[in-house]
Amino acid sequence: MTPEAVRFEVVRECPRTRARAGLLHTPHGVLETPAFLPVGTQGSVKGLTQQMLEELGVRMMLANTYHLFLRPGHELIARLGGLHRFLSWTRALLTDSGGFQVFSLSALCRVSDEGVVFRSHLDGSEHRLSPESTIEVQAALGSDIRMVLDECLEYPATPEHTRRSMERTLGWAQRGLARAREQPGGDDHPGAVFPIVQGSMFADLRRECARRLVELDAPGYAIGGLSVGEPRSLSFEMVEASEDILPRDRPRYCMGVGMLEELGEYVARGVDLMDCVLPTRNARNGYLFTSRGRLIIKHQRYRDDPRPLSEDCACPACARYSRAYLRHLFLSGEILFAVLATGHNLTTYLDRMRRIRLSIMDGNLPELLRSFHSQPVDQE
């Protein structure tokens, strides 16, 4: 890892919120922030080709270390030239540590200060992940931004359990960053390693964790452990507790959030990067996001509706097809529905983030957020 692997440039700050517009320079291109990252768990955003993602304007996508570690394996990907070449993706990649999936998918998981022993959800085979090996796997993948191993707690958690878990996460962050600094690794491009702020829903522990991670002088920081069942007001509170301690000249990545109406709220609290499976997973389930509220396509009232999903959206689904036709595709189980719906939902998310960034540049983010609040959550 080198300081030049990822460089963050603040272009404009909002004087009335904590928001800022920036440029995140990576070995595979520049990303305008704030930005939403589509999730490509297996190295693929379900329903869309890489060319489609490029046409949507995606500059960075997320891939999952746990799944790629198990199948097809990081050694194979490294032999084939790294994850960018394997995916035929020339833009930036972020990989998570795999820790969340270990804790959520493995029926048998043993955690200690040394790392995690778990059984694969695919075949039951036993594997080990340590703070060092997680970094080594991501170096073999060659991603631009890599996450340290962290422990993500369920909600609610006790203060005592959270304290022990936070100390473990801090120790893992020190070891992971030390390993990254020993060898850059990867596909001829060094990656930047981000530690992760944890502390469950306890603001004092979040602040302590953030302060101690700042001492590690990392190129960027993530905020994890959210969207685990807590009230959304608590999620925002935990971001606020962490954000004002994290360096203003480094990018902040809030992991696994959020709903369309929440994106601006995280940005207003100083978040630069977000990812979430909601727009793609919900699309495949017939749950669509529009500027006029959510739309559940299976509802009977759309059976003979000739209108597009959203009249202010230029995605292929809205430009060409009616709600009635999309409902027919969904109820018929046609693959085309997943393609069109996923493209639509991601277009909606990416357009929302572009509007938010532009409002920061123009100095009217609070007004834009108020206009979002006035919009219905669900269509009539």
Image (cartoon, grey):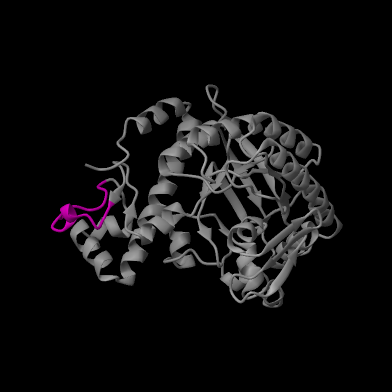
Q: Relative to the observer, which residue lies in front, 329 or 248?
A: 329
Residue 86 percent across, percent down from the top left: 61, 73
Could you tell whether 19 is left or right of 319 in the image? right
Q: Which residue is pictured at 28% across the width and 49% down the height?
A: 295
Residue 296 percent across, percent down from the top left: 28, 52
Up the image or down, 200 lies above or below 59; here it is: above
Quadrant of residue 329 in the image? bottom left
Q: Main secondary structure of the magenta part?
A: loop
Could you tell whether 314 is left or right of 299 in the image? right
Could you tell whether 5 is left or right of 124 in the image? right
Quarter of the image for the C terminus: give it. Answer: top left
User: Could you tell me if residue 95 is visible in this image?
Assistant: no
Furthest-right residue in view? 182
Q: Which residues are magenta?
A: 296-311
Q: Which residue is pictured at 20% across the width and 63% down the height?
A: 325
Furthest-left residue in view? 304
Q: Relative to the observer, which residue lies in front, 170 or 39?
A: 170
Magenta span includes 375: no
Q: Relative to the observer, which residue lies in front, 298 or 83?
A: 298
User: Could you tell me if residue 26 is visible in this image?
Assistant: yes
Magenta span includes 297: yes
Quadrant of residue 76 in the image? bottom right
